[in-house]
Image: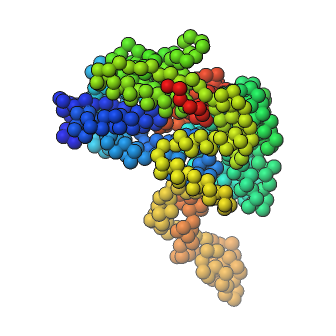
């Protein structure tokens, strides 16, 4: 039990109501935020306790991931620290591995579980809020898990930035044309918001960076977008989707529609149209699926693995259980077609969290619940600096106006005034000064330098005469390569001098740990489920990355 009085027990104070929130993304953070505002008196008196269990101590504002990857925003400003925002809640860094709602218990593994050797925590609760979000949906494509990288977390976004710049370093220094071509080829799979925006921002960044390389021109970079359907960005409409394809192709980006990725083994991307593209970079943004914890619960799920919910955001047929966001199938009461569900995107997640918190408080106080109703307003997407597309309330925008609307809307939606001010300051400075082109891939191996310096020196080994200080000193009557008292061609005596060793700081030489992680394999595809918004989980997605309804770029006002 995660309480100060009984940290390892399974019970709780008899007069306390515990609300367990699983997940610290959009829904998890905003639900906890609204609860601590509406239940401030109860939480201070100890009558109500709100516990948030999340794998990461921060909420990631995913709409800003492409700009963080491009270096327009600092990574620390893309995330919101939960302990600072939820100062009246109890934040537990860990993962819920299973739930038994019939017994009102959850099994939680924390960072200390393995070291304690006492097993995971068993956490009791009275009210459950399920908001674990989603993870990247991968397919059994050869080489995908070994060579691809996802684009769902801030770690992946910054790792991808470092990787792209490092590939340019490799291409600039190699003498092998095949290695150069593979290093300068970047393949993105998925034509939803995540794929298109990540591609647009990184291409813009790499094109700017190329001016600082003496032997790399912008046209040397090869960018490929693979999409299984016949269109990209379906949320902004067919017309804006066609404009986006034209815009990308005008920037030397190869857009492959109705094409699938069949293999990326051995660093060769094999496409369904027969193309074989040697590449060191494959970015997988072809959809998401619900977090695995949902399968370890006794709650009802739909065919896609999401929790079945009512319009009041309660779990269907279950008491004292609530759900919203990517993990929930919430009926869309504003839709014309019966049976339609709300898209799992940020536009809905933020509003659902508010209604969920209000209904949970109403339930505790014996008041009636209200339905969640919000009519979809539209979407915006950035295609790089000063480029974008938007479809808002039937109005279609493109170019600079759409890009400006994208920034304005998401600046207004990023949590806390602190983050808003910092993001605005960074955008202002970016307009006044040159762009940063630094790769910090060594951050992935922070101990590499010290480990090399602290490693023991190599043992003395036999060396040849050429490594001896006197190897080239000859005496009369001898020939080079021989010593006195030996005949020409006879092996000389072993030299007592040890061979020279690499300098302590040269981690790039054989025997030393790598200086950075970018030159090797990027991280395997798949997010960590720390956020509750991303590309749509399962709509029209397959091996080529069919378009997902990713509302991370959605805009509009509430009509609650």
The count of marks equals 0
Q: Nearer the viewer, residue 178 or 127?
A: 127
Instruction: Tell me the residue at 66%/37% (across/down).
Output: 381
- x then y, percent, for residue 445: 51, 55
Q: Residue furthest bottom?
A: 476
Instruction: Tell me the residue at 47%/27% (across/down).
Output: 352
Left-right relation of 445 to 18: right
Tell me if I can see residue 326 in this picture: no
In the picture, the quarter occupied by the N terminus is top left
- x then y, percent, for residue 168: 70, 54
Q: Nearer the viewer, residue 455 or 48?
A: 48
- x then y, percent, for residue 278: 73, 41
Tell me if I can see residue 31 in this picture: yes
Instruction: Tell me the residue at 49%/46% (across/down).
Output: 79
Q: In which quarter of the view is residue 32 placed?
A: top left
Left-right relation of 222 to 315: right
- Relative to 481, is 351 above or below? above
Instruction: Tell me the residue at 68%/76% (across/down).
Output: 481
């Amino acid at each position: 039990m995660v309480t100060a009085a009984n940290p390892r027990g399974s019970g709780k104070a008899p007069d306390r109501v515990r609300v367990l929130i699983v997940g610290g993304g959009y829904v998890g953070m905003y639900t906890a935020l609204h609860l601590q505002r509406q239940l401030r008196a109860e939480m201070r008196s100890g009558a109500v306790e709100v516990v948030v269990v999340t794998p990461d101590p921060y909420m990631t504002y995913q709409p800003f991931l492409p700009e963080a990857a491009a270096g327009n925003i600092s990574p620390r400003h893309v995330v919101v620290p939960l302990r600072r925002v939820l100062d009246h809640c109890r934040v537990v860094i860990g993962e819920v591995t299973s739930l038994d709602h019939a017994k009102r218990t959850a099994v939680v593994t924390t960072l200390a579980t393995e070291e304690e050797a006492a097993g995971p925590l068993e956490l009791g609760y009275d009210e459950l809020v399920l908001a674990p979000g989603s993870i990247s949906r991968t397919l059994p494509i050869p080489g995908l898990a070994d060579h691809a990288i996802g684009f769902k977390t801030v770690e992946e976004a910054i790792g991808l930035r470092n990787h792209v710049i490092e590939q340019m370093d490799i291409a600039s220094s190699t003498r092998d044309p095949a290695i150069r071509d593979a290093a300068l080829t970047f393949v993105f799979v998925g034509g939803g918001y995540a794929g298109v925006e990540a591609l647009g921002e990184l291409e813009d960044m790499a094109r700017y960076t190329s001016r600082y390389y003496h032997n790399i021109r912008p046209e040397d970079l090869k960018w490929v977008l693979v999409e299984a359907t016949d269109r990209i960005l379906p949320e902004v409409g067919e017309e804006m989707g066609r404009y986006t394809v034209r815009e990308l192709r005008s920037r030397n980006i190869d857009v492959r529609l109705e094409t699938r990725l069949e293999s990326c083994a051995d660093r060769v991307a094999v496409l369904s149209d027969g193309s074989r593209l040697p590449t060191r970079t494959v970015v997988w943004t072809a959809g998401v699926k619900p977090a695995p914890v949902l399968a370890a619960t006794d709650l009802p799920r739909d065919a896609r693995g999401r929790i079945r919910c009512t319009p009041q955001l309660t779990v269907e047929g279950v008491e004292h259980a609530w759900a919203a966001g990517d993990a929930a199938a919430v009926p869309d009461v504003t839709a014309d077609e019966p049976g339609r569900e709300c898209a799992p995107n940020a536009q809905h997640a933020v509003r659902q969290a508010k209604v969920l918190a209000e209904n949970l408080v109403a339930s505790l106080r014996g008041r009636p619940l209200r339905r969640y109703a919000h009519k979809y307003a539209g979407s915006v997407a950035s295609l790089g600096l000063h480029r974008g597309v938007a479809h808002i309330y039937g109005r279609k925008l493109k170019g600079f106006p759409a890009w400006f609307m994208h920034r304005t809307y998401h600046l207004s939606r990023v949590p806390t005034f602190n983050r808003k001010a910092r993001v605005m300051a960074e955008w202002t400075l970016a307009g006044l000064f040159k762009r940063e082109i630094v790769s910090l891939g060594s951050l992935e191996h922070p101990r590499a330098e010290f480990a090399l310096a602290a490693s023991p020196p190599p043992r003395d080994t036999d060396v040849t005469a050429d490594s001896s200080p006197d190897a080239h000193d000859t005496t009369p009557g001898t020939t080079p390569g021989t010593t006195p008292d030996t005949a020409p061609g006879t092996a000389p005596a072993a030299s007592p001098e040890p061979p020279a060793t690499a300098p302590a700081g040269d981690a790039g030489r054989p025997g030393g740990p790598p200086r950075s992680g970018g030159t090797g394999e990027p991280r395997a595809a798949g997010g960590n489920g720390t956020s509750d918004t991303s590309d749509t989980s399962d709509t029209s997605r397959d091996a080529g990355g069919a378009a997902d309804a990713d509302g991370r770029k959605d805009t509009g006002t509430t009509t609650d």
